[in-house]
């Protein structure tokens, strides 16, 4: 069933209308920070929203930028897929050997190993201290619960409970 003319006009006018998109939404869509979107607006890469509201960009402008980025990434995708046939070492090895790099590596490698050993030792010490702290806090909490129970028995208990609480306090603290 064909649409009435009035519905088609409304639909086409909606398609032609441009909406505002907040900087935060545009930043998420582009995969950049909100500040970067602000800079893009200042550089003219994105245009402000049609209503002129602050911190908004044009939806059409955002779609255009996204399309441009997709076009720039498109040619790179087959190249990276073709490049996977070789190993990463093929791309990283220089065309001629560099003896100075070996000397530098021999100098830096022991330093990095010692720093890594210190890091592992520090993390181990931190884990041990954390375990000790947890045990001390657990003991302290148990002590507080016991004290509260004794005080509660002394304050609210009958004669027999108060007598037991006094005896427990003597055993505990003397």
Image: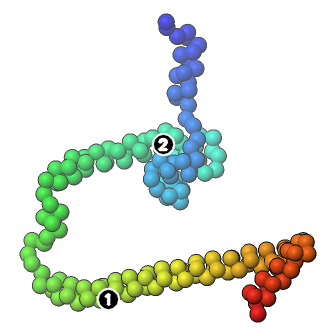
Q: Name the residue under label 2.
A: 61
In terms of depth relative to the viewer, which is nearer, 95 or 88?
A: 88
Q: Is residue 12 visible?
A: yes
Residue 39, image x, y percentages: 51, 58
At x 56%, y 17%, the residue is 9
Q: Name the residue under label 1.
A: 114
On-image quarter of the C terminus: bottom right
Q: Is 96 displayed left or right of 53 in the figure? A: left
What distance separates the C-alpha of mark 1 from that of mark 2? 52 Å
Q: Is 43 displayed left or right of 173 in the figure? A: left
Q: Is 30 displayed left or right of 102 in the figure? A: right
At x 17%, y 68%, the residue is 92
Residue 45, image x, y percentages: 46, 51
At x 44%, y 81%, the residue is 123
Q: Is 156 displayed left or right of 18 in the figure? A: right
Label 1 environment density (alpha carbons within 10 Å; few <14, some 14–19, many ≥20): few
Q: Residue furthest front?
A: 160
In terms of depth relative to the viewer, which is nearer, 123 or 27?
A: 123
Secondary structure, mark 1, is: helix
């Amino acid at each position: 069933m064909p649409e009435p003319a009035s519905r088609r006009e409304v639909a086409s006018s909606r398609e032609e209308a441009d909406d505002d998109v907040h900087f935060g939404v545009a930043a998420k869509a582009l995969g950049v920070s909100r500040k970067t979107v602000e800079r893009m607006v200042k550089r003219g890469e994105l245009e402000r929203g049609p209503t002129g509201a602050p911190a908004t960009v044009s939806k059409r402008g955002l779609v255009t930028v996204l399309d441009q980025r997709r076009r720039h990434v498109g040619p790179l995708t087959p190249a990276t897929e073709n490049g996977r046939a070789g190993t990463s070492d093929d791309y990283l090895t220089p065309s001629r050997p560099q003896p100075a790099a070996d000397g530098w590596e021999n100098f830096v490698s022991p330093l990095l190993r010692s720093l890594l050993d210190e890091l592992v030792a520090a993390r181990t010490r931190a884990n041990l201290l954390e375990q000790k702290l947890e045990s001390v806090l657990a003991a302290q909490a148990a002590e507080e619960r016991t004290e509260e129970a004794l005080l509660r028995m002394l304050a609210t208990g009958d004669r027999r409970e108060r007598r037991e609480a006094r005896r427990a306090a003597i055993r505990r603290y003397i």
